[in-house]
Amino acid sequence: MSDFTTDAPILRRNTAAPRREYYAYFALIFAATIPLSLLTWALKAARRMELPEKGPIASAWSQARIITPHIFSA
């Protein structure tokens, strides 16, 4: 009697999303959120008559950092 379990191929499941795809989505979301964050930043600056602590690029970056993982966890 032979043991066939040792000849079975090892199937590895890739649970981590590819980095290139993640960065592509991140760049797309970042580019899409820049105009909205610029508008929001300008409205806050005009309403308060002072510059907000967080700039529009930092705001867009944080939004992209929040949204992109949600896409890959779904």
Image (tube, rainbow, N blue to C red):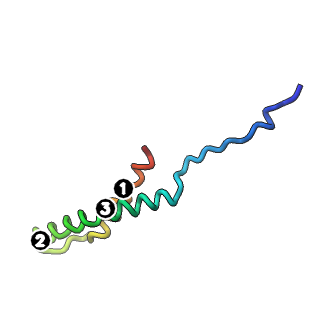
Q: Secondary structure at mark 3?
A: helix
> What residue is pinned by disc 2?
46
- Closer to us: 33 or 62: 33
Q: Quadrant of residue 59?
A: bottom left
Counting residues from the start of the chain, the first of labels 3 and 1 encountered is 3
Q: Mark 2 packing: few (<14 Cα in 10 Å), some, or many (20+)?
A: few
x then y, percent, for residue 16 = 54, 50
Please, what is the three-letter code of the amino acid marked with disc 1? Ile
Which label lies toward us, 2 or 3?
3
> What residue is pinned by disc 3?
32
Q: Secondary structure at mark 2?
A: helix
Residue 29 is left or right of residue 15, and the answer is: left
Q: Secondary structure at mark 1?
A: helix
Image height of 66 relative to 54, above or below: above
Residue 23 is left or right of residue 39, and the answer is: right
Counting residues from the start of the chain, the first of labels 2 and 3 encountered is 3
Residue 66, label in figure: 1
Which label lies toward us, 3 or 1?
3
In this view, the residue farthest toward the bottom is 50
Q: Mark 3 packing: few (<14 Cα in 10 Å), some, or many (20+)?
A: few
Counting residues from the start of the chain, the first of labels 1 and 2 encountered is 2
The number of discs equals 3
Instruction: Give the alpha-carbon distance from disc 1 to disc 2, as whole Å.
Output: 26 Å
